[in-house]
């Protein structure tokens, strides 16, 4: 039995690679820490010397500028820079979250299509991937914003779509539902959804009538959708709409979807989907052909083979690079600044940094936000990956 | 590993090197042999390079005047195009020595590490709209969508004006002036707003300038001028006095054309201005003939104005507030004595 500071061979600890490694790591950490400390100190000193205010005193100061898309209440006269930060943050989150969902769907479809035996489908998907992947995203965003969305009619000649929806080069204007009591009405579908999930969990392991997949799905859907609709109708349908109307200058009222938002979302989804398609294709091809043949020998249909045999195995290969694509999409959303979408970078790292003249603090916060976005996304995807990963015994 | 170490080293150097030369800017500039001037790059009349890379503009000529005073050579200027977002950081980190980029003098900018030296253009914010809208006043713009550049005083004035007049506003903000203007042109917005001087220049950039009209309202005070870093009084004085000297030269009718004759003038004010009497330039750390150099190589304030934004330019802006105080304007320089 070797003593802890000696390795099994009786070599002194300073010649043991294990301890040497630890010592090196400690030294490196210390050096890194010192470097960070020195950088911050120097920056602070320089700022103080050039009489730039530091700290976060600006956070509670009235912002005084307008933002074109606000998901939470915001007004130039009473909201603070801190509030502007949250507005920008939410705008980034919305476009990133929607972008991730849509890019995943589109990417999977294209990825599967690339492997299609149908000549036209396969070539079209290949063409899509090659074209989109090789044109810079910024150009694509400018293309969607300038060439496509601006080609829409001017607001005075808005396209009137069914249901009172207006479409013009200033955006898509939807009727805004006016609830008798917003919070209560929203609570009902939320509760129903929760109930449906709960039901699904409880009946998951049962073997009788409830164990039949189709029965379970039908009842889950019934609880999630039919129940809130029934409650809504029974309570007298307390719902009115605020319809958008063309005014002298603009469209008044309604729910406004900015063309900048649509252009950014389109650009991000289409661009990222091309990469996701390649990831999916690689994943599907990693599953050996024997698996498909075996499945077909057992009498599974093509779709069943894909859904039950190939995709679950392909997911192990797909998830890690897919995570990178999600991170890329989120970070790429900061290109919004080029087309006037008020995301975190435009609102906070742009306007707020400029008006407060405290770029160091503002940029540091912005970097921290993107870092946390990325780390949280990674965490979620790693947890998901852990579930899908091959369990070895 | 080696790459990481290199990157870290680079980062460390960047932070240390970011230490701006707070004192002794004049010496730094002389040693370097060239003046680094933060300019606009997108605004006709103020700072815009042409297709050959020749910069023109009232702010550009101001930097040339500073270079002329220091080096007796108006070409020893490197124009660094700056954006609204990076202009102050560029000045504070020492990337540029002077910021001459139609920048508004405000209290917060003055208080926070920057020193506006003078006002080389008295401006105010205005609006441009399509003639077809038949709008006669900015007060009719309730509910209008307005394109504006982000991070400017313009953006704040706009919100203030609509709030003060109880009007509803939809702003669409862009990082660059050109993007905002393009969005206005394609009818994303009903109006476009920036400083009035910029409106005239921007109007010329539109495909059909005659379809657009500048509204009469001026909704803010925008004293535009060069900025320097706080903490170097000598440099602050030099940049401030170059502007004053150009004004004094105009007032005394010393022009690019007649400056050589004026050297023989018996007028004591002109003699002090051109350094044939006393040593005022040397008190600033320059030479006796500093104003002679500025006027000879660049011109007096009136000449610079007319050449870049006035009757000698496509903008045709009248002097207005920017006329000398003796001619109904408010451009007024302290005496050189």
Image: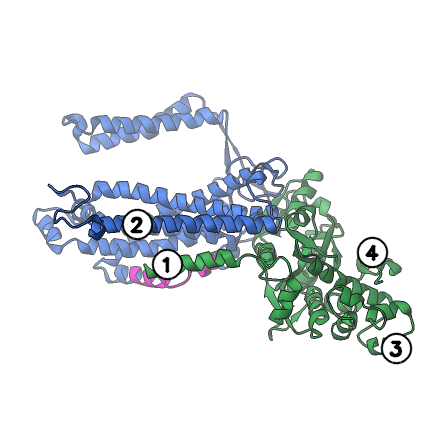
Chain colours: A blue, B green
**Decide: marks 3, 4 in contact (CB < 8 A)?**
no
Identify the residue at image location x=30%, y=28%: A196
Reply above or below: B146 against B18. above
Q: What crowding class fits label 4: few (fewer than 14 Cα within 10 Å), some (14-19), or many (20 or more)?
A: some
Q: Secondary structure at mark 4?
A: loop
Closer mark to the observer between disc 1 and disc 2: 2
Of B240 and A40, nearer the camera is A40
* Boundaries of the magenta span: A125-143
Q: For the residues carrying marks 4 and 2, which lies nearer the camera in this image? A: 2
Residues behind callouts 4 and 1 on a single chain = yes
- The disc numbered 3 marks a residue on which chain? B
Q: Which residue is mark 1?
A: B5
Lateral position of residue B133 relative to residue A107, left or right? right
Relative horizontal placement of residue B62, taking residue A336 as reference (left or right): right
> Does label 2 lie on the same chain as label 3?
no
Host chain of mark 1: B
Task: Let me know if residue A56 is in the magenta part.
Answer: no
> From the viewer's perspective, is A362 left or right of B146?
left
Q: CA distance from mark 3 to mark 4?
A: 30 Å
**How much space separates mark 3 and mark 2, taking CA atoms?**
77 Å
Q: Quadrant of the N terminus of chain B?
A: bottom left
Q: Position of residue A15 (x, y in %)?
A: 21, 53
| Residue for badge 2 | A25
Is A130 magenta? The answer is yes
Magenta stretch mostly in which secondary structure? Answer: helix
Helix, strand or loop at label 2? It is: helix
| Label placed on residue B264 | 3
Instruction: Let me know if marks 4 and 2 both belong to one chain.
Output: no
Residue behind mark 4: B330
Dot in front, 4 or 1: 1
Q: Are marks 3 and 4 on the same chain?
A: yes
């Amino acid at each position: 039995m070797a003593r802890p500071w000696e390795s099994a061979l009786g070599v002194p600890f300073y010649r043991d690679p294990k301890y040497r490694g630890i010592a090196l790591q400690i030294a490196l950490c210390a050096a890194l820490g010192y470097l960070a400390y020195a950088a911050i100190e120097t920056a602070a000193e320089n700022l103080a010397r050039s009489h730039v205010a530091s700290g976060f005193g600006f956070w509670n100061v009235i912002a005084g500028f307008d933002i074109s898309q606000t998901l939470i209440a915001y007004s130039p006269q009473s909201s603070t820079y801190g509030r502007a930060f949250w507005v920008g943050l939410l705008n980034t989150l919305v476009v990133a979250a929607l972008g991730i969902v849509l890019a995943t769907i589109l990417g999977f479809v294209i990825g599967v299509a690339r492997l299609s035996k149908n000549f036209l489908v396969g070539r079209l998907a290949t063409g899509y991937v090659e074209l989109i992947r090789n044109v810079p995203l910024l150009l694509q965003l400018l293309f969607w914003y300038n060439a496509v969305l601006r080609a829409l009619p001017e607001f005075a000649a808005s396209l009137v779509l069914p249901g009172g929806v207006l479409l013009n080069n200033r955006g898509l204007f939807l009727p805004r539902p006016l609830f008798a009591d917003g919070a209560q009405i929203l609570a009902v579908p939320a509760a129903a959804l929760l109930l449906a999930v709960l039901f699904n969990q409880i009946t998951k392991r049962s073997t009788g009538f409830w164990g039949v997949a189709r029965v379970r799905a039908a009842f889950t859907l019934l609880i999630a959708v039919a129940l809130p609709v029934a409650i809504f109708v029974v309570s007298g349908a307390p719902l009115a709409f605020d319809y958008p109307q063309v005014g002298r200058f603009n469209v008044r009222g309604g729910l406004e979807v900015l063309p900048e938002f649509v252009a950014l979302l389109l650009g991000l989804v289409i661009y990222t989907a091309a990469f996701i398609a390649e990831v999916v294709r690689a994943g599907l091809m990693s599953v050996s052909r024997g698996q498909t043949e075996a499945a077909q020998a057992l009498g599974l249909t093509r779709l069943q083979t894909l859904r039950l045999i190939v995709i679950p195995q392909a997911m192990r290969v797909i998830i890690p690079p897919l995570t990178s694509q999600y991170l890329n999409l989120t970070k790429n959303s900061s290109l919004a600044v080029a087309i006037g979408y008020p995301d975190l970078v435009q609102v906070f790292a742009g306007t707020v940094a400029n008006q407060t003249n405290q770029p160091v603090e503002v940029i540091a916060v912005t970097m921290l936000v993107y870092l946390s976005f990325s780390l949280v996304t990674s965490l979620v995807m790693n947890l998901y990956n852990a579930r899908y990963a091959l369990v070895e015994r | 590993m080696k790459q990481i170490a290199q990157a870290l080293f680079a980062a460390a150097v960047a932070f240390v090197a970011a230490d701006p030369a707070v004192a002794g800017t004049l010496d730094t500039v002389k040693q370097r042999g060239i003046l680094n001037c933060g300019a606009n790059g997108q605004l006709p009349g103020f700072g815009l390079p042409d297709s050959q890379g020749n910069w023109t503009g009232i702010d550009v000529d101001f930097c040339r005047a500073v270079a002329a005073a220091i080096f007796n050579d108006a070409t020893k200027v490197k124009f660094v195009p700056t954006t609204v977002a990076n202009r102050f950081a560029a000045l504070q980190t020492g990337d540029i020595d002077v910021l001459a980029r139609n920048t508004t003098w405000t209290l917060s900018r003055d208080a926070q590490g920057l020193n506006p030296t003078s006002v080389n253009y008295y401006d105010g914010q205005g609006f441009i709209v399509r003639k077809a809208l038949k709008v006669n006043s900015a007060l009719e713009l309730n509910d209008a969508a307005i394109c504006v550049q982000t991070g400017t005083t313009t953006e704040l004035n706009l919100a203030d004006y609509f709030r003060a007049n109880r009007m509803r506003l939809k702003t669409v903000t862009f990082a660059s002036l050109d993007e905002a203007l393009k969005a206005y042109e394609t009818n994303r917005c009903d109006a476009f707003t920036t400083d009035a001087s910029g409106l005239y220049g921007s109007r010329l950039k539109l495909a059909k300038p005659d379809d657009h009209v500048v509204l009469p309202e001026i909704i803010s005070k925008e004293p535009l001028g060069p900025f320097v870093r706080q903490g170097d009084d000598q440099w602050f004085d030099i940049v401030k006095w170059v502007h004053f000297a150009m004004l004094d030269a105009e007032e005394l009718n010393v022009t690019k054309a007649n400056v050589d004759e004026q050297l023989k003038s018996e007028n004591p004010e002109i003699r002090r201005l051109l350094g044939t009497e006393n040593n005022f330039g040397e008190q600033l750390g320059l030479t006796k003939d500093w104003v002679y150099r500025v006027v000879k190589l660049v011109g007096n304030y009136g000449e610079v104005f007319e050449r870049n934004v006035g009757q000698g330019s496509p903008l045709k802006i009248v002097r207005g507030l920017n006329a000398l105080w003796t001619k109904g304007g408010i451009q007024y320089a302290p005496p050189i004595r």
